Amino acid sequence: MSINILAIESSCDDTSASVISDGKILSNLVAGQKVHEAYGGVVPELASRAHQANILPVVDMALKQAGMALTDLSAIAFTQSPGLIGSLMVGCSFAKSLAQSLNIPLIGVHHMQAHVLAHFIDKPKPVFPFLCLTVSGGHTQIVLMRNYFEFEIIGKTLDDAAGEAFDKAAKILELPYPGGPLIDKYAQGGNKHAFEFAKPDIPELNFSFSGLKTSFLYFIRERIKTNPDFINENMADICASMQEAIIYHLMKKLVKASKQTGIKQIALAGGVSANTGLRKAIDIEGQKLGWQTFVPAFEYCTDNAAMIAITAHYKYLNAEFESLDVSPSAR
Ligand code: KG4
Ligand code: ZN
């Protein structure tokens, strides 16, 4: 008998469903939510409502694409934490009722663990122990992975996440939300040494991005005073320089973590791992330092249900199931 799992991800503003069979992803559908663009950030109440509207068609399409009927499923998985509570609730309730009606196990998945385990979807796969720089809109961590379920967070941000730094810089530049991908796009045509911003100096393996954001804000304000068109005239150079400052800080700590632990299996995960500059930086640094580097395919960088599905697959093998009274948790 095959292990067929339907996984649902609804932690933030993407409704996603994926079907995995014996550890192989058969479908991975993501419905984004354009409704937040006008607000410069995710509006939680609107996100919950959009999840409610999207979840049934997305699940239906994921099953159809996988050629799977509900009765073929061995378990239902969902993102249990962390995320927006209303958004998590939609996925959790849906998964619970489906598991109950089909009388099959329910699997709760931690979103950040799933970002890391996304590396086990495709080959080549990292070998334990490995280090994973997990950079998303809400988290920035260096995780030491000992096996699928045992890990240690050896560094983390003390304030903003790397994705937040991208998004807040984009907001200052009056770019729509989420700004990370747009900064990436403009940066590709710019000079990363054009402007200098405050370099964070944080102890140990921790990160901080709030000083950088403030330095960026003051820089833009000053320049606009003398030239109201400064942003438009220098968009590519501004984006390239800000992106470089964020990458510099991330890479410095990642190199330090590798030297401290002696681990040279290095992975990148989370939405910001889609960033072209960061992917290039880890590649270049990796060649210099003899790392074996692992960067997920673009579709598995930002939020997706395939990463929930692969994590659920390992949990299924471990018989780690939830009871039907499980509730989601924001943190
Ligand atoms: O992992 P993710 O999809 O959602 C969370 O769990 O937070 O990450 C979203 C974050 C956003 O801050 C977004 O701006 C950033 O990832 N992001 C990027 C890129 N693509 C997504 N940041 C920089 N460059 C990109 N190409
Ligand atoms: Zn995420």
Image (spheres, rainbow, N blue to C red):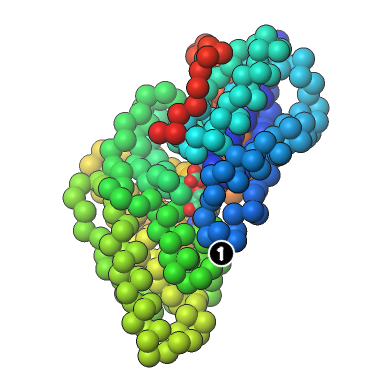
Residue found at x 42% / y 46%: 138
* Frontmost residue, 168 versus 4: 168
Q: Decide if residue 123 is in sight here.
A: no
> What is the secondary structure assignment of the residue under circle 1?
loop
Q: Decide if residue 319 is in sight here.
A: yes
Q: Which residue is mark 1?
A: 176
Tell me residue 159's x, y (percent).
30, 50
Residue found at x 38% / y 90%: 226
On screen, 33 above or below 19?
Answer: below
- Relative placement, left or right, of 200 versus 219 is left
Residue found at x 51% / y 18%: 326
Residue type at mark 1 is Pro
On screen, 163 above or below 294?
Answer: below
Residue pushed farthest left? Answer: 203
On screen, 110 above or below 97?
Answer: below
Q: How many tags in the picture? A: 1
If the image is split into quadrants, where does the C terminus sit?
Answer: top left
* Frontmost residue, 123 versus 72: 72
* Frontmost residue, 30 versus 250: 30
Residue pushed farthest bottom? Answer: 226
Q: Mark 1: is the Cβ under 8 angstroms from ligand 1? A: no
Tell me residue 316's x, y (percent).
56, 16
- Relative placement, left or right, of 151 versus 121 is left
Quadrant housing residue 210? bottom left
Residue found at x 44% / y 69%: 172
Q: For label 1, count other residues whose C-alpha is less than 10 Å away and answer few (under 14), some (14-19) or many (20+).
A: some
Tell me residue 60's x, y (percent).
77, 31
Tell me residue 224's x, y (percent).
40, 84
If the image is split into quadrants, where does the N terminus sit?
Answer: top right
On screen, 73 above or below 137?
Answer: above
